Image (cartoon, grey):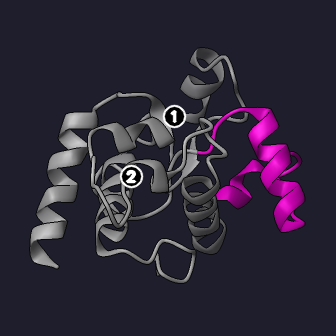
Amino acid sequence: MFKFIGLPLSTQIAYGLATTQWETAHTFKPVREAFWLSESWRKKNLRYYPYYGRGYVQLTWENNYRMYGGILGLDLIGDPDLAMQPDVALFVLGHGMKTGTFTGRTLEQFVNRKSTDFVNARKVINGLDKADEIAKIAEHYQSEA
Protein backbone atom coordinates (compact mmCIF):
# COMPACT_ATOMS: atom_id res chain seq x y z
CA MET A 1 0.00 0.00 0.00
CA PHE A 2 2.69 2.57 0.93
CA LYS A 3 4.95 1.55 -1.96
CA PHE A 4 2.06 2.28 -4.29
CA ILE A 5 1.79 5.84 -2.96
CA GLY A 6 5.51 6.54 -3.31
CA LEU A 7 6.87 5.56 0.10
CA PRO A 8 8.88 2.43 -0.79
CA LEU A 9 11.34 2.03 2.08
CA SER A 10 10.51 -0.34 4.91
CA THR A 11 11.26 2.49 7.35
CA GLN A 12 8.79 4.75 5.54
CA ILE A 13 6.19 2.01 5.57
CA ALA A 14 6.78 1.51 9.30
CA TYR A 15 6.29 5.21 9.92
CA GLY A 16 3.18 5.37 7.75
CA LEU A 17 1.67 2.46 9.66
CA ALA A 18 2.59 4.00 13.01
CA THR A 19 1.01 7.30 12.03
CA THR A 20 -2.12 5.55 10.83
CA GLN A 21 -2.32 3.54 14.04
CA TRP A 22 -1.95 6.66 16.19
CA GLU A 23 -4.19 9.00 14.20
CA THR A 24 -7.01 6.46 14.04
CA ALA A 25 -6.86 5.64 17.76
CA HIS A 26 -5.48 2.19 16.91
CA THR A 27 -8.47 1.26 14.71
CA PHE A 28 -6.66 1.46 11.34
CA LYS A 29 -9.95 2.76 9.95
CA PRO A 30 -10.66 6.29 8.75
CA VAL A 31 -12.13 8.12 11.74
CA ARG A 32 -13.61 11.49 12.60
CA GLU A 33 -11.76 13.72 15.04
CA ALA A 34 -13.00 12.90 18.55
CA PHE A 35 -15.10 10.10 17.03
CA TRP A 36 -16.26 9.00 20.46
CA LEU A 37 -18.08 12.34 20.87
CA SER A 38 -21.20 13.58 19.09
CA GLU A 39 -21.44 15.72 15.99
CA SER A 40 -23.09 18.42 18.09
CA TRP A 41 -20.03 18.41 20.36
CA ARG A 42 -17.74 18.87 17.34
CA LYS A 43 -19.93 21.69 16.02
CA LYS A 44 -19.82 23.49 19.37
CA ASN A 45 -16.14 22.91 20.22
CA LEU A 46 -14.09 22.75 17.03
CA ARG A 47 -13.33 26.17 15.56
CA TYR A 48 -12.72 24.66 12.12
CA TYR A 49 -16.09 22.83 11.98
CA PRO A 50 -17.23 21.29 9.63
CA TYR A 51 -13.71 20.79 8.27
CA TYR A 52 -12.49 18.88 11.31
CA GLY A 53 -10.11 15.94 11.17
CA ARG A 54 -11.18 12.95 9.12
CA GLY A 55 -9.44 9.96 7.60
CA TYR A 56 -6.20 8.21 8.44
CA VAL A 57 -4.27 11.42 9.19
CA GLN A 58 -7.09 13.71 10.26
CA LEU A 59 -7.40 15.99 7.23
CA THR A 60 -8.34 19.33 8.82
CA TRP A 61 -9.15 22.93 7.77
CA GLU A 62 -11.23 24.14 4.84
CA ASN A 63 -8.22 25.01 2.68
CA ASN A 64 -6.95 21.41 2.92
CA TYR A 65 -10.37 19.99 2.06
CA ARG A 66 -10.52 22.37 -0.92
CA MET A 67 -7.03 21.42 -2.09
CA TYR A 68 -7.56 17.66 -1.84
CA GLY A 69 -11.00 17.99 -3.38
CA GLY A 70 -9.36 19.69 -6.36
CA ILE A 71 -6.61 17.10 -6.65
CA LEU A 72 -9.07 14.20 -6.45
CA GLY A 73 -11.94 15.80 -8.36
CA LEU A 74 -14.26 15.40 -5.36
CA ASP A 75 -16.53 17.91 -3.64
CA LEU A 76 -14.89 17.68 -0.22
CA ILE A 77 -16.16 21.17 0.60
CA GLY A 78 -19.79 20.18 0.00
CA ASP A 79 -19.37 16.72 1.51
CA PRO A 80 -16.39 16.59 3.91
CA ASP A 81 -17.31 13.03 4.88
CA LEU A 82 -15.91 11.88 1.53
CA ALA A 83 -12.53 12.13 3.31
CA MET A 84 -13.65 9.10 5.33
CA GLN A 85 -13.61 6.81 2.29
CA PRO A 86 -10.59 4.49 2.61
CA ASP A 87 -9.25 5.25 -0.88
CA VAL A 88 -9.50 9.00 -0.29
CA ALA A 89 -8.01 8.74 3.20
CA LEU A 90 -5.11 6.65 1.87
CA PHE A 91 -4.39 9.12 -0.91
CA VAL A 92 -4.37 12.02 1.56
CA LEU A 93 -2.01 10.11 3.88
CA GLY A 94 0.44 9.17 1.13
CA HIS A 95 0.33 12.41 -0.81
CA GLY A 96 0.69 14.52 2.31
CA MET A 97 3.68 12.54 3.57
CA LYS A 98 5.31 12.41 0.14
CA THR A 99 4.82 16.05 -0.86
CA GLY A 100 4.85 17.88 2.46
CA THR A 101 1.35 19.23 1.98
CA PHE A 102 0.44 19.23 5.67
CA THR A 103 3.36 21.14 7.20
CA GLY A 104 5.87 21.77 4.42
CA ARG A 105 7.97 18.82 5.59
CA THR A 106 8.20 15.52 3.69
CA LEU A 107 8.75 12.08 5.14
CA GLU A 108 11.83 11.76 2.92
CA GLN A 109 13.50 14.55 4.92
CA PHE A 110 13.45 12.40 8.04
CA VAL A 111 13.20 8.81 6.83
CA ASN A 112 15.34 7.97 3.82
CA ARG A 113 18.06 5.59 2.63
CA LYS A 114 20.74 7.36 4.68
CA SER A 115 18.98 7.99 7.98
CA THR A 116 15.87 7.29 9.99
CA ASP A 117 14.54 9.84 12.45
CA PHE A 118 11.13 8.62 13.53
CA VAL A 119 10.78 11.28 16.24
CA ASN A 120 11.25 14.27 13.94
CA ALA A 121 9.23 12.57 11.20
CA ARG A 122 6.19 13.66 13.20
CA LYS A 123 6.84 17.17 11.85
CA VAL A 124 5.37 15.92 8.57
CA ILE A 125 1.94 15.61 10.21
CA ASN A 126 1.66 17.66 13.40
CA GLY A 127 4.78 19.25 14.84
CA LEU A 128 6.20 17.06 17.58
CA ASP A 129 2.83 16.22 19.14
CA LYS A 130 3.13 12.66 20.54
CA ALA A 131 6.32 12.18 18.49
CA ASP A 132 8.00 9.84 20.97
CA GLU A 133 4.99 7.54 21.24
CA ILE A 134 4.57 7.32 17.46
CA ALA A 135 8.31 6.74 17.00
CA LYS A 136 8.12 3.75 19.36
CA ILE A 137 5.27 2.29 17.32
CA ALA A 138 7.28 2.81 14.11
CA GLU A 139 10.32 1.16 15.69
CA HIS A 140 8.16 -1.84 16.56
CA TYR A 141 6.93 -2.14 12.97
CA GLN A 142 10.47 -1.75 11.66
CA SER A 143 11.72 -4.51 13.96
CA GLU A 144 9.06 -6.80 12.49
CA ALA A 145 10.07 -6.05 8.87
x and y, in percent, of residue 90 in the image: 56, 68
Above or below for 20 versus 77: below
Task: Name the residue rendered at 89%, 48% in the picture.
Answer: 78
- Name the side, left or right, on which 79 lies relative to 106: right
Q: Nearer the viewer, residue 67 or 30?
A: 67
Seen from the viewer's position, the closer of residues 87 and 46 is 87
For this view, does 10 lie left or right of residue 137? right
Of 58 and 45, the residue lying toward us: 58
Q: Does residue 22 appear anywhere in the picture?
A: yes
Residue drawn 35% across the image and 28% down it = 128
Q: Dot 1 surroundings within 10 Å: few (below 14), some, or many (20 or more)?
A: few
Q: Quadrant of residue 102?
A: top right
SS state under label 1: loop
Give residue 25's position: percent from left, percent from top.
Answer: 32, 48
The amino acid pointed to by label 2 is: Thr
Q: Which residues are magenta?
A: 59-83
Element marked by disc 2: loop
Q: Residue at x 26, y 39 (%)?
A: 119
Question: At 19% from the left edge and 36% from the top edge, which residue is drawn?
Answer: 132
Q: Nearer the viewer, mark 1 or mark 2?
A: 2
Kindly indicate the quadrant of the structure image that contains residue 11.
bottom left
Say whether residue 75 is visible. Answer: no
The residue that disc 1 covers is: 38
Amino acid at pointer 1: Ser
Prevailing SS of the magenta stretch: helix
Quarter of the view holding residue 105 = top right
Q: Is residue 82 left or right of residue 129?
A: right
Q: Are marks 1 and 2 in contact (CB under 8 Å)?
A: no
Residue furthest to the front: 114
Q: Is residue 144 left or right of residue 111?
A: left
Mark seen at residue 24: 2
Residue 7 to residue 115: above or below: below
